Image (cartoon, rainbow, N blue to C red):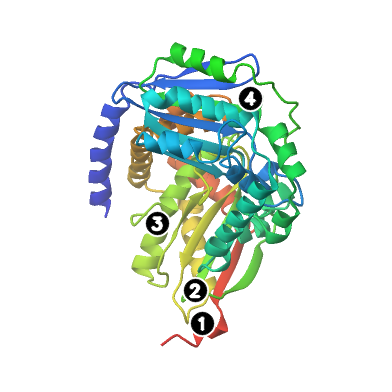
Amino acid sequence: MKRFLTSMAIILLLGIQAVSATPLPITTFKLDNGLTLVVSEDHSSPTIGLSIAYHVGFRLEPKGRTGFAHLFEHMMFEGTPEAPKGSFVKIIQGGGGSLNGSTRYDYTNYISTAPVSTLEPILWLEADRMRHLDFSKENLDNQRDVVKEEIRVNVKNKPYGLFFWTDLAALAFNKWANAHDGYGSFVDLDKATIEDVKRFHQTFYAPNNAVLAIAGDVDPEQVHQAVKKYFGDLPPAKLPPHADVAEPLNTQERFREEQDEHASVPAIAIGWKMPGPDSPDYYPLAVLGELLMGGDASLLYQKLIKEKQTMLSISGGLGWPLGDPLTFGGPSLMVAFGLYKPNHEAVQDVNSIQQVINAIASKGVDAKRLKAVQTKMVADYYKSIARNLQRADYLAITQLLHGDADLLNRYPALIEKVSPADIQRVAAKYLTVNNRSWIDRKIAPHQQEKQP
């Protein structure tokens, strides 16, 4: 195994050195109304990736309106008085492109990729829906039903039902902004009114609460002029203060047992409270998460699945499954999620996981193994930003959350400089039993009766 990791590290390192020789070109502009524009010029193909990220996500949605930020993301595709529903799809997909949107803890983003010839129509469409939407009861009811169906499919009627995110966060965090179910509840979604939707748009969907990023076959100054043309007359909004989402580490273990109506094997989800990205421990923790759970060569996979053979799968990491180290603006969890074999006690696996962590905290980690993990993380990162769409999205998110899109150029060095001593220190400080929250998701009795 050590020989394999060393060989892999050498191969990946050679590839990374070739890719990372030149920093990403990043040019940043700010319009008078507060809209920030980030452009990364790349003439390797006649295409563009575009992302517009708004500084509103689960943590900023109204209390008593769980899932409202997610609902509103859907409303943004319902058309405007100037561009009826379907205009985005017609223009972008009609030219061979693609589009999507997502809601996370600290932002909502809208992404598209298309031939560069469609850039100005896309800018017009994005500015148009920043200006106004088609606020109708029909659209609200339609998208409310869509979100409800998502909840049925992905939560209520699916094995494990995202409990490793929604239930685990509710158990581990204390503040409502961090702990509530951002996917949404039927009760709260039904309370949403047209006035709520209008107010949300007026409050958060404003130029001074957004970053627009474009990567691809463009000239930065020409893009700047086009963005001023379409967005320049949009008025800024008076933004509300952001919620204080900081939380101390937990001082006593938290546990919950649940039953799963659809799963055929039981599962565990463990979460340790993590600091926000302004902490000096943040990137060491990101590397530690990869070291523990990053694939078949990870420490927990080797211990629990290969050696002990008591678990069927293990995955997770810092901020998993809702993001990565670059996409959080506040605290998150280090999550470990896995399926374990029936007729076996979950606490035994939880203790085995903690033993691996305690060994790192007391004895440290092998430097060659650490280097292999870091090399893979950086290689995976470069592979992701090679695509215009992913690059634009990271540019928008890092500028929005950290105030500096050039973090993309510094990120590999932040990962590579993590030392064995850093890993040992953060394992001892954060991945403790007292800071641990975990859920044992058992098979429902009627499912157990089906077992052979």
- Disc 3 or 1, which lies upstream in sequence? 3
> Does dot 1 land on a helix, a strand or a loop?
helix
Residue 198 visible in this rendered orientation of the protein: yes
Q: Which amino acid, mark 2?
A: Ala
Q: Are marks 2 and 1 in contact (CB under 8 Å)?
A: yes
Q: Residue 278: percent from the left, percent from the top?
A: 60, 33
Q: Are marks 2 and 3 in contact (CB under 8 Å)?
A: no
- Disc 2 or 1, which lies upstream in sequence? 2
Q: Nearer the viewer, mark 4 or mark 3?
A: 4
Quadrant of the rendering where the N terminus is positioned: bottom left
Which residue is at a point 34% across and 42% down the rendered structure image?
Answer: 376
Q: Which residue is mark 2?
A: 263
Mark 2 → mark 4, Cα distance in angstroms: 45 Å
Q: Which amino acid, mark 3?
A: Leu
Q: Give the side of residue 380 with respect to residue 50, left or right.
A: left
Q: Which residue is mark 1?
A: 447
Residue 390 visible in this rendered orientation of the protein: no
Q: Give the side of residue 197 with respect to residue 113, left or right.
A: right
Q: Nearer the viewer, mark 3 or mark 1?
A: 1
Q: Which residue is mark 3?
A: 299
Q: Give the number of the disc on residue 207.
A: 4
Q: Nearer the viewer, mark 4 or mark 1?
A: 4
Q: Give the side of residue 67 with respect to residue 354, left or right.
A: right
Q: Which amino acid, mark 4?
A: Pro
> Does dot 4 land on a helix, a strand or a loop?
helix
